[in-house]
Every structure is written in structure tokens, then in C-alpha cells.
Amino acid sequence: MVKKWIPLTSMFLIVLALSIATYIYSNPIKNDSLCGQQLGTAKIFKMQLPIVHFGAVTKYLLPKPEKFPNAIQVAKDGSAWFGEQSVPAIGHLYLNGTYVEYDWPINYSPSTTAIWGIQLWNGGVWVTDALGAQLVGLDPNSGQLAAVKLSNAASFPYTTAIAPDGSLWFTELYGDKIGRLSSTCQLSEYTIPTSYGGTPTHIAFVNNTRGYYIDVGNATSGIGALLSFNPTNFAPRPVTANIDLYAPSGIAISQKTGTLWITQHGASSVASYQPENQSWTLYPTSTITYETTTLPYFDETNGSLVWFNEHYANRMAVLNSTERILTEYSLSNPPSSKIIGIDNALTFALGKDTAWFTELTANYVGFVDASFTPPYSISTKNQSITVKSGSAANVTVEVNGLSSIPLTVHFADSENITSEPQNIEFTSNATDLPSLNGQEVLQIRVKTESNLLPGQYTVLISVTNGLIYRGCYISLRVTS
């Protein structure tokens, strides 16, 4: 039997999902904005939340008992909708701290469900309910709730995406299927061929005839896949890769360039894929000391900016693909120094000027101000270098800005899944900057070991005050 990949915070839900009771629903809702079968009316609570702010980060503390917030989406007015797994409920949070909770008339006690997908769709707020094996929709105006039940009680509906034709698509993590719900409430579930894995995690669309989804693979191999499909005639086909994708969990598509961006939950890097020339590039993240990987989870892109959350690193990151600059924001102050201290920021969503996130175990919902300008920057003119295996090259990096807090210099590369340098050695004229007032120049020697295989690598050189990492990428070509 093939062992399935399991979301790190949801292992306990599998057994519960297998024994879930069947709910009996009454007549369909007589409301054009919600399809499905009636669940009843939500209990609505409203209050003001306390606000925490530091740097680019603003966080709102949810009331106790802990809500286990997960899955989030941003409305046009800048407010955020999110799931509450322990209640279960759907929450609505405004920038001024006003919080509205819509409790479902469902009692899973003492268990909790898992809510990983949420969309503002078809006139309602729709979420995935793993324990109920259903999609749950809320009409915020009336508080009415509806549900669309799936065929398999253990399917674990996971993430969601809206197709160009307006239909709602979702992955079934343990059902070996991908689902589609039309605006008229017609449910279709497409079985994934067993040869293609069967553990889909995330979907993204290019247009009406082409979409992609990520299959995380199984826990034995840890190797997943990228697959393409035609939404009008579902027949997935794997995309050829000349790299291994380690537990890929998220996918985003740049509509301007056609580039696919893939987060690797089993590694400390993000992968990009160019369909026109079938080329792959790995972008390492800044490493952490208390775990071997930072565990990037999901990603979204707007133009040349690619946002993603780093689960174990407890950070929100934005990669500027044009300038090849990475900025990583700690979601806690002080930053996490051990795994037990992370907030479990598992999901996020982009707004106009915000990157909203949920913190499952810390009981916060918050955002990073996308318009925030960090007080220091980093750049290099040596964006690509070529060296023979066993030889070295010099790189000049400039750090500009202001910082009364010491900045430390860090290195990462794409030679292994941890992004920790092993066969590439970095030597700098300074390992830290006691303060910054203007410009500092770093002279860095990049030496490759003789046993480093020839090929293309990506190097990340960054500086940090602990809360914010600023890094620049350099392409390293190693020849024999």
C-alpha cells in the first residue's frame, strides 16, 4: 500500500474522516446566490479585536477559545474572510479590527474539522470542510449556510481555485480526485489515474483550455509532480521535469510571462518553470538554524512579484523575479528560534496592498503591508558567474540604507533540499555589519568544491536584522 502525504497539522483528521456520520439535509435553499442543500442559519457574533503591529506586519488576536484559523481570501474592500476549524465557522475581519464570526449549525465536538480552501464565489463565501467531506457556502447577507456533499467521506477536500469560466475547482487530498462545482451546483469529480500519483494539492489556470495542478506524491518517495490538463476534458499529463520536486504543495502562474511558480513543502526552495523552453530554476530561501528546511507552503503572484509563506521559518516572503531580490518578513517579534515557537502560518492570500495570513496555533490573523519599504536593500551587478568545479569567483554586493541594529550576512544555495551550502564555500570580508548608515560593500569569494557536479545553481546572499531578510540571487554555472 502506498503511503500518502499528510498535511503536517492534519494527521489526526484522517481517522476521524473515515468514521464521519452522514448528515441529512432538508430542501435546497431558495436563494440564487447559494446552491446546495440547506444547513440552516449561522449564529453571528461581532467584536473588536486587539491589534499587534511591528514593521510591515499587522496581526489581530482572535478571541478564545482558540479558533484554529486556516484558509483565507481577500475581498474587494480589503477585508479578509477565513475559516475557523475548531468552531467550525467562517470569520470576517476588517482592517480596523472589526471581526464578525459566522458559526455553523454543525457540532463536530470534541473533534475539529480542517478548512484549507476558501473562495468568494457565486454570491457566497465557500470553504472546504474536510471532516464533513463537503463544500460549505455562506450567504453573508442572510447568514444562511448550504453544503455540497462529496461522494467519498474520506476524500478530504483541500484547496480551491476559480476557473476562467467561473466554476469552482478543488482538490481531494485523499480521494484521488479533482472536483468541479458549476455555478448551477453541478458537481463533477474527476478520478486521477493511479500512475500520476493521486494526491493533488493545488490548482492554477492559464485559460479556459489549460490548467495545472500539483501532486505532492507519496510520503515514501517525497517526490511529487506538476501536471497539466484541459478543464473542458480532464485528462492530466505530467510535465517533464529535469529536477525532483520535493513534496510540491503550491502553484501560481504569472499571467504576464506564463512562468509557473511552485513551492516545495519538503525543501527550502521555490521552483520556477518556463513552459516555452521547458526550463526549471530553483530559488533557495534563507535558512534557519532549528530545522533543516523552511517548508514553503503556498504561493501567489501579481506581476513580477511572487509571494509565499515559509511554514517552519515562520515568515512571509516576496520574490521580485525581475530584480532577483528576495524579502522575507518574520511573522513574530521576536523571530522564532525553535520549532515549538512558530505560529503555524499555513495559508495566505493577496489583496491589493496586503498579503493576509492565518496563524493556526497562535490564534492570529494578520497581513504584511505589501507597500512597506524595508529600511535597507541589497543588490549586485554579478547576477551570473561561471566557474570550474574546484575553483572560485569573486562577487561584489552592495548594502544600502539605515539600520541601528546589527545586520548579519547569510548564504544559501540550491545544491540540496535544505539550501544549506555544502559543496559551495562562501567567504566575505564581513560577516556582520554593526550598523548601517548609507552604503556598505561586501566582497564575497564563492568557491566550489571539486566534487560539486557541473550544472546550474542559484546562490542567495542576504543580510538581516532578525525580523527582515533582504537577499539577492546569483546564477552560478559550474563547468567541469
Image: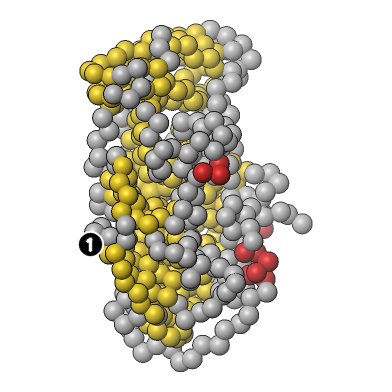
- As displayed, is residue 114 above or below residue 60? below
Q: Amino acid at mark 1?
A: Asp
Q: Is residue 436 visible?
A: yes
- As displayed, is residue 286 above or below residue 432? below
Q: Residue at x 50, y 45 (%)?
A: 342
Q: Quadrant of residue 370?
A: top left
Q: Position of residue 357 (x, y in %)?
A: 39, 52
What is the quadrant of the N terminus in the image? Answer: bottom right
Q: Residue at x 64, y 61 (%)?
A: 12
Q: Residue at x 51, y 44 (%)?
A: 341
Q: Tell me if mark 1 has few (under 14), some (14-19) or many (20+) residues whose alpha carbon lies within 10 angstroms of its own.
A: few
Chosen colour scheme: secondary structure
Residue 266 appears left or right of 29: right
Front in this rendered view, residue 305 or 38: 38
Count of number-bearing discs: 1
Q: Position of residue 459 (x, y in %)?
A: 46, 23
Q: Position of residue 15 (x, y in %)?
A: 68, 66
Under circle 1, the secondary element is loop
Q: Which residue is mark 1?
A: 77
Q: Position of residue 408 (x, y in %)?
A: 41, 22
Q: Residue furthest bottom?
A: 27
Q: Is residue 230 visible?
A: no
Q: Residue at x 48, y 19 (%)?
A: 477
Q: Quadrant of residue 421?
A: top right
Residue 57 appears left or right of 271: left
- As displayed, is residue 85 above or below residue 253? below
What is the quadrant of the C terminus in the image? Answer: top right
